[in-house]
Image (cartoon, rainbow, N blue to C red):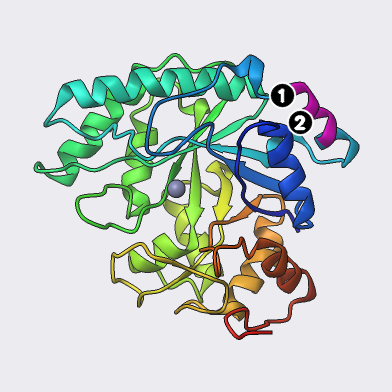
Amino acid sequence: MIIGSHVQMKAPDFLEGSVREALSYGANALMLYTGAPQNTRRRPTEELHIREAAGLMEVNRIPMEHMIIHAPYLINPANSVRPEVAELAVEFLMSELERTAAIGAKYIVLHPGSYTTTDPETGIRTAISQLNSLQIPDGLVICLETMAGKGSEIGFRFEHLAEIIAGMNHPEHFGVCLDTCHISDAGYDVSDYDGVLDEFDRVIGLNRLHVIHLNDSKNEKGARKDRHANLGQGTIGFDTLCRIAHHPRTAHIPKILETPYIDGKPPYGEEIAMLKEKKFRDLMKAQ
Ligand SMILES: [Zn+2]
């Protein structure tokens, strides 16, 4: 099982601290933002302890492909209403791609964006033209995330992502990150995981799937809300999520937990242990 979680990247150890945090959870994968997800202030890569982090990954036999970068969610490549916002997004995304390459990571997760006051088709067309203007470094793959369909988000149908990828001048640089909470909120029946994978394969192609966000959902299937829940504390349930974590068809793909902190503390060590043991424990109950 390739399993990890969202981890922090902060002073003084930056990336090295991120890898240590992941190791403390018993993880063999991790995902991080290169700075605050809601702003564009970033440290120079020379300060990020990249070499130390890579060394720590190597000693622990974790391939760099299991270190996932998440682009900040303020980037909205589907915004045609304010082209200057979309342009800024592309400019910042370019610098994120360069940082990802400098770090030595291969996959960067990106929300395809929101069409704001237009319509999904316009949003998809806008995203296609914005993403086609990127100069993507060699070997790097942008993983478009499946979205819940909250507000005016695009990407809540596999068809949307397939259409964007089909419109790319360099489709070899594009893949998909599947979020279990988001697709359940979008109306897919996650309890039929094989059915979901068949549908994904038919519409996008399973060879495009590189990252799985493993989250429970606070809302019913089809609610289009996007509120993550801890494993076994939501409408998807522990048994289904555990089955996905161990499923042979996606065994080679890193699964990343983005579940909420409990009492101000990350629950990832416990949640990863639960998945390894295939046994649910109620983390909400005082021990
Ligand atoms: Zn995301």
Residue 209 spot, x, y in % from top left: 55, 46
On screen, residue 246 versus residue 214, left or right, reads right
Residue 42 spot, x, y in % from top left: 48, 23
Q: Residues within 10 Å of mark 1 (few under 14, many from 20)?
A: some
On screen, residue 36 versus residue 69, left or right, reads left
Residue lying at the far right of the rendered structure? 59
Q: What secondary structure is found at the residue carrying circle 2? A: helix
Residue 162 versus residue 185: which sits nearer the camera?
185
Span shown in magenta: 51-56
What is the quadrant of residue 257 in the picture?
bottom right
Q: Which mark is residue 269?
A: none
Residue 78 within the magenta-colored segment of the rendering: no
What is the quadrant of residue 123 in the picture?
top left
Q: Residue at x 60, y 44 (%)?
A: 8
Residue 141 versus residue 158: which sits nearer the camera?
141
Q: Is residue 175 above or below residue 277?
A: above
The number of callouts visible is 2
| Residue ID for mark 2 | 53
Residue 56 versus residue 64: which sits nearer the camera?
56
CA gap between label 1 and label 2 equals 5 Å
Q: Residue at x 73, y 41 (%)?
A: 19
Q: Is mark 2 within 8 Å of ligand 1?
A: no
The answer to whether the residue labelled 1 contacts the one labelled 2, judged by CB atoms less than 8 Å apart, is yes
Q: What is the chief secondary structure element of the magenta stretch? A: helix
Q: Quadrant of the N terminus?
A: bottom right
On screen, residue 126 versus residue 35, left or right, reads left
On screen, residue 110 versus residue 59, left or right, reads left
